[in-house]
Amino acid sequence: MKEKYKIVEKNICGINNPRLVLKIKTDILDIKIKVLSDSKKIEYELLQLDKDTVMITADLGKDDKVIEVYDKEKKELILQLKNRLISRVFDKVFSFIKKVCARIRVVFYVLGRGTKFLWREYHFLVPISLWGKYFMDFIHKATGSGAKFYNPFYVDDYNKWLKENERKVEYQKLKYNPKISIVIPVYNATSKVLSECIDSILNQKYSNFEICLADDKSTNKSTIETLKEYEKKDKRIKIVYRKKNGHISKATNSAIEMATGEFIGFMDNDDLLTEDALYQVVKVLNEDKSLDLIYSDEDKLDINGKFRDPHFKPDFSPDTLLSLNYVCHFVVVRKKIVDQVGGLDSRFDGSQDYDFLLRVTENTNSIYHIPLVLYHWRMVEGSTALSGDNKEYASDKGKLAIEEALKRRAIKGEVEKDKVSTYYKVRYLYDKEPLISIIIPTRDYVDILKKCIDSIYEKTTYKNFEIIVANNDSKEEETLKFFKEYKKKYKNFKVVDCIMDFNYSKINNIAVSKSKGEYIVLLNNDTEIITEDWLSIMVGYAMQEHIGTVGAKLLYPDYTVQHAGVILGLGGVASHAYIGSPRDDIGMYGRLRVPYNYSANTAACMMIKKSKFLEVGGLEEDLMVAYNDIDFNIKILEKGYYNVFLPQVELMHYESKSRGLDTTGEKYKRFKIESKYMFDKWDNILNNDRFYNPNFSKKGWFMLDRKNKD
């Protein structure tokens, strides 16, 4: 049995109410066991934790003595445990000690991180007005009390948040009531799961729908019996019984062929809709009848009846969609578009919905995202919601879907499966290297500048670039000597003098006007190149017609994240996502591994096509110090372009030493003035970042706010 089962954890915990907790690693897909207590069979719960690990839990009696776990098919003993009170008491005491030690570690960890933060951001010159805030932050984080947020990926946290934010919908009479055809491919679904799926549609508050089910030659008799029962139950239910099993795409297409609705809603045979799902879709259509594709947020329902793993999505993000199928469920598409693209393609079974969505989004820009959870994936055996490895071929089919999309769009590119996550990275290819102008503003601090420029020349594999140092009135002889030396050393190195008071926007605008490149990189003088092909990757994205700014992952010297995309309205005007996260963190749904659309990128390292830079008038010169890059990114969005963050491109960022701090005196006043400027100009956009789901907190990235907590 040791070859088939590896015991990862075995424990009987609880003093008054003992409970068996058992974790097993096994390569058996359909694990079948039985649990005995003193030779009597007892009920247990089984949860799939990942592709090869299951957790078994069972409630025991206080007087039970011997617990045995057997392989049901082979009738072989997997494990035997003795249920002793003294062992359970010891376990309780040991758990308490572990908690105390963990709390002490947290206190020291928070103290260390806080010290680094205050030095990095303020050099300990913290404005008096912020002392109270940071002290309370420390107390909350160190004690775990008064926490501001729920973590959406902690099951208990998420369910508490759902309870606190229970949706109360005021249903109104709608003028426009299009028929929606819900198409469902069915294959060997259990009677219970299939019934609950269909019932969740029949219980909709919006009534103008039909349910089109295509049975894909199920061999399970109860599946057929359930379908026939529902066929008699409601006239809105249509069923076709396929004579040959054709797998998911062909079955879905059979369901689509029966559809008479103006819109098609896609659903799996083991999932659930919230009762307001169709109403929310039609409500949006009443506001804009031209919409062709509507999608919502979603979560999962585990085998214990708890909701988990919510996916709070951004509004339409074309580059994110080339990294992963973030749209997924619930999706409603105009039937005219479904027919136009030819339904689902069986060549992509496993990732057929991904291929379908890529084709649909090539045929319409009328796309709308509803930021509400309207769909629950059921975590049942065989479902990709339970384990993506139930369909091992899906990853390769997803890669193929992206490759085919690039071909249809006449775009040269390679698709790579990310080695850590289950997502993808596109690398755009081009025949000729366009000239890139790298613009670096500086004022003295030549040691910092030299480190930056040397890293470009020594590490960059891309050949066709020029470096323009925007000299903001450097005085030191060593700096001027450096300029002279490097102009002789490199033909593609030049200095543009900007003799004026510091105005970041104006300095860069002047340097851009003197540049010869087709593409511009704004780069801080306190950065250092890590990724050797950084320019090659970034310019491939900047070449795409729909893309505006292209950003990179910036790291602090301790290799934690400094920049990974910018979220508008976070903590004020804007803030970087994932500040302080480990370099190798995957991020939520791969945000630190694969390209994602964000509203903004920092100008500490940002590429854009020069014509697009000029199209929006460059950087706003009224914003001399702060938020000029945020303002610029928003102007780019307003022109209809998308900004994209590339985590595969990494640079070190040592922070703006040559400019000084913004915490005291005139600089702090300037910072406050420029903050006000941004809210006066962009208030609505700052409060409604379309690439950051409104369910998330504006005080902590990708967290959920607790009610009545500040």
Image (cartoon, rainbow, N blue to C red):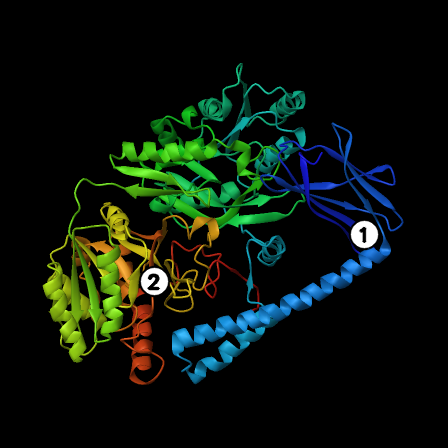
Q: Which residue is mark 2?
A: 652
Q: Which mark is residue 155?
A: none
Q: Nearer the viewer, residue 136 or 294?
A: 136
Spot occupied by residue 197 in the image (x, y as percentages of width and height): 60, 34
Label 2 packing within 10 angstroms: few (<14), some (14-19), many (20+): many
The answer to whether residue 145 shows anywhere in this view is no
Q: Are marks 2 and 1 in contact (CB under 8 Å)?
A: no
Q: Going by the image, does 313 lie left or right of 32?
A: left
Q: Inspect the image, locate mark 2, and give the three-letter code of the amino acid beneath it.
A: Met
Q: Going by the image, does 472 lie left or right of 581?
A: left
State whether residue 569 is above or below residue 34.
below
Q: Nearer the viewer, residue 36 or 455?
A: 455
Quadrant of the rendered image containing residue 222: top right
Q: Which residue is mark 1?
A: 18
- Say which residue appears at 51% left-offset and 72% top-offset: 112
State whether residue 63 is above or below residue 657.
above
Q: Quadrant of the N terminus?
A: top right
- Say which residue appears at 11% left-offset and 56% top-offset: 516
